[in-house]
C-alpha cells in the first residue's frame, strides 16, 4: 500500500516563497537545458470553446527524481455559482518507483512560478542598468509579476501598470496590488523601495520602459513594434494557448528571441502567430532561457538589442516548485497523508 501527501493552499503558503520560486524555476530551466528535464507535449481539450476547457502539462525532472503533471480546468461560469473560475492540481511521482508522492493545490504555486519565469527572463536578458518596469495587464497574475521582478532585479525601482482594456479602476487596483506585492515580498523577507503607479497611455509607457511584462489573454497584439525603443526587454507571459498574441509579429521579427520551450512556444505560445504569419520561423529563436542559464547559449550581446522571452508555462516549473514545497511540508509535518 502506498501513501500520498495532500497539500492545501494554506500548507503551501507556509513553506513556499517568491525566492523559492525563482530558485526552483531557474534550476528547472537549467536541468532542461542539460537534458535532465523534459516538458512533454501539452494536452488541451475544450468542453465548450471559450466557455470551459482543461489542459494537462506534464514532464520529468530526473535530477530532482520526479515526474508529474499539472491539470488546470477553466470553467468561466463558475464564479456565478460561487466557485473559482480555475481549479488547478499538481501530482508529483517518484521517478525510480512511479509511486505518487503528493497532490498539491497548484494555484498556490502558479502565480509565484509564473512571476519567477518572467523575472528570470529579465534577470538574464535585460540591460544591466534597467530601472523602469511596465506590466501590461492588471489582473490576478500581474501582482506576482511585480513581486517577482522586484525580487529578481535589484535595479528596478519604478513600476508602471497598464490595463490595455482600460476596463478596471486602475488607481484602486494599483493600491490593492501594492498591498499584495508587499505581502509576497515580506513572506520571503525581502525589503525593496520602489514606486508603483497606474498608467493609461500604453504607447507612452512602452516607450520609456526598460523591461515590459505582458500578462493578458489578448488575441490581437497590445504592444506595437513602433512603440518599443532599442534596448528594451519584454517577457511575454499571457499567451499560453493557440490564438493568443500580445506583441506584434513585426516586434517579434525585430527582437532577439528566447523561449522556455521551443516546441510549445511555436505551437501555443507567444511566437505561434508570428510563425504562422511568416514574420519569423522557429529557426529565429536564439535559445531556450535554460541554455543561457546553463552557459550553453548567449543572451543579450548589445545594449541596443530588443530581447523577447516567451514563457508559455511548462511542467518543469511546477515540478521543481512542488518538490520544494513537498520536501518542506514533510520536514514540518504539514498536509494530510492518505493511504491509497
Ligand atoms: N505563461 C504562463 O505560465 C501563464 C500562467 C498563468 C496564466 N497565464 C495567462 O496569463 C494571462 C493573464 O492571466 P490573469 O489570471 O492575470 O487574467 P485576468 O483575467 O485576471 O487579467 C487579465 C488582464 O488583461 C486584461 N485583458 C483582458 N482581455 C484583454 C484583451 N483581449 N486585450 C488586452 N487586455 C485584456 C484585463 O483587463 C486584465 O487587466 C491569461 O492569458 C492566462 O492564461 C499564463
Image: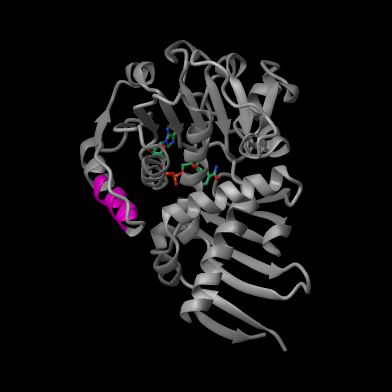
Instruction: From the viewer's side, name the closer residue of 118 and 76.
Output: 118
**Is 268 above or below relative to 16?**
above
Question: Image quadrant of residue 98?
Answer: bottom right
Query: Up-down: is 200 above or below 74?
Result: above
Residue extending furthest top?
Answer: 226
Point out the stretch of residues depicted in magenta: 178-186
Instruction: Report the residue at 54% width, 76% height from top.
Output: 6
Left or right of 66 in this view: 112: left
Q: Tell me which corner region of the image, top left, top right, bottom left or bottom right, holds residue 4.
A: bottom right
Using the rendered image of the protein, determine whether residue 334 is visible from the camera's viewpoint.
no
Q: Is residue 171 visible?
A: yes
Tell me the chief SS of the magenta region.
Answer: helix
Question: What colour scheme has been applied to the protein in the rendered image?
Answer: one colour
Horizontal and vertical percent position of residue 153: 40, 37
| Foreground pick, 256 / 76 | 256
The quadrant of the picture occupied by the C terminus is bottom right
> Where residue 271 appears, x then y in whole percent?
63, 28
Q: Quadrant of the N terminus?
A: bottom right
Residue 180 magenta: yes
Along the line of sight, the residue nearer the viewer: 138 or 169: 138
**Residue 265 coordinates in the image, percent (x, y):** 66, 35
- Above or below, 15 against 295 in this view is below
- Determine which quarter of the picture holds residue 193: top left
Count how many numbered circles sit on residues in the image.
0
Q: Residue at x 49, y 16 (%)?
A: 303
Residue 113: x %, y % from top left = 51, 51
Q: Was residue 276 drawn as part of the magenta stretch in this picture?
A: no
Amino acid at each position: 500500500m502506498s501513501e500520498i501527501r495532500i497539500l492545501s493552499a494554506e500548507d503551501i503558503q507556509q513553506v513556499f516563497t517568491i525566492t523559492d520560486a525563482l530558485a526552483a524555476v531557474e534550476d528547472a530551466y537549467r536541468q532542461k537545458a542539460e537534458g535532465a528535464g523534459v516538458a512533454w507535449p501539452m494536452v488541451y481539450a475544450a468542453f465548450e470553446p471559450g466557455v470551459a476547457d482543461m489542459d494537462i502539462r506534464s514532464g520529468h525532472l530526473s535530477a530532482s527524481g520526479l515526474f508529474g503533471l499539472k491539470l488546470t480546468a477553466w470553467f468561466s461560469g463558475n464564479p456565478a455559482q460561487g466557485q473559482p473560475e480555475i481549479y488547478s492540481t499538481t501530482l508529483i511521482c517518484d521517478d525510480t518507483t512511479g509511486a505518487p508522492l503528493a497532490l498539491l493545490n497548484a494555484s498556490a504555486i502558479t502565480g509565484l512560478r509564473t512571476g519567477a519565469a518572467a523575472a528570470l527572463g529579465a534577470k538574464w536578458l535585460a540591460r544591466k542598468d534597467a530601472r523602469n518596469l511596465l506590466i501590461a495587464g492588471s489582473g490576478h497574475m500581474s501582482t506576482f509579476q511585480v513581486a517577482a521582478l522586484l525580487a529578481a532585479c535589484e535595479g528596478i525601482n519604478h513600476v508602471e501598470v497598464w490595463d490595455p482594456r482600460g476596463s478596471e479602476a486602475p488607481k484602486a487596483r494599483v493600491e490593492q496590488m501594492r498591498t499584495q506585492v508587499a505581502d509576497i515580498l515580506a513572506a520571503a523577507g525581502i525589503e525593496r523601495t520602489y514606486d508603483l503607479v497606474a498608467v493609461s497611455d500604453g504607447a507612452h509607457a512602452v516607450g520609456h520602459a526598460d523591461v515590459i511584462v505582458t500578462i493578458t489573454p489578448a488575441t490581437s497584439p497590445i504592444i506595437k513594434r513602433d512603440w518599443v525603443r532599442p534596448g528594451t526587454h519584454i517577457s511575454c507571459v499571457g499567451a499560453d494557448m493557440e490564438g493568443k498574441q500580445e506583441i506584434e509579429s513585426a516586434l517579434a521579427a525585430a527582437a532577439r528571441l528566447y523561449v522556455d520551450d521551443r516546441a510549445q512556444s511555436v505551437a501555443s505560445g507567444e511566437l505561434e502567430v508570428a510563425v504562422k504569419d511568416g514574420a519569423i520561423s522557429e529557426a529565429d529563436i536564439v535559445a531556450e532561457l535554460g541554455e543561457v542559464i546553463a552557459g550553453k547559449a548567449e543572451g543579450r550581446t548589445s545594449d541596443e538589442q530588443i530581447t523577447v522571452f516567451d514563457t508559455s508555462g511548462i511542467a518543469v516549473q511546477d515540478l521543481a516548485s512542488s518538490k520544494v514545497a513537498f520536501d518542506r511540508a514533510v520536514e514540518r509535518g504539514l498536509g494530510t497523508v492518505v493511504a491509497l
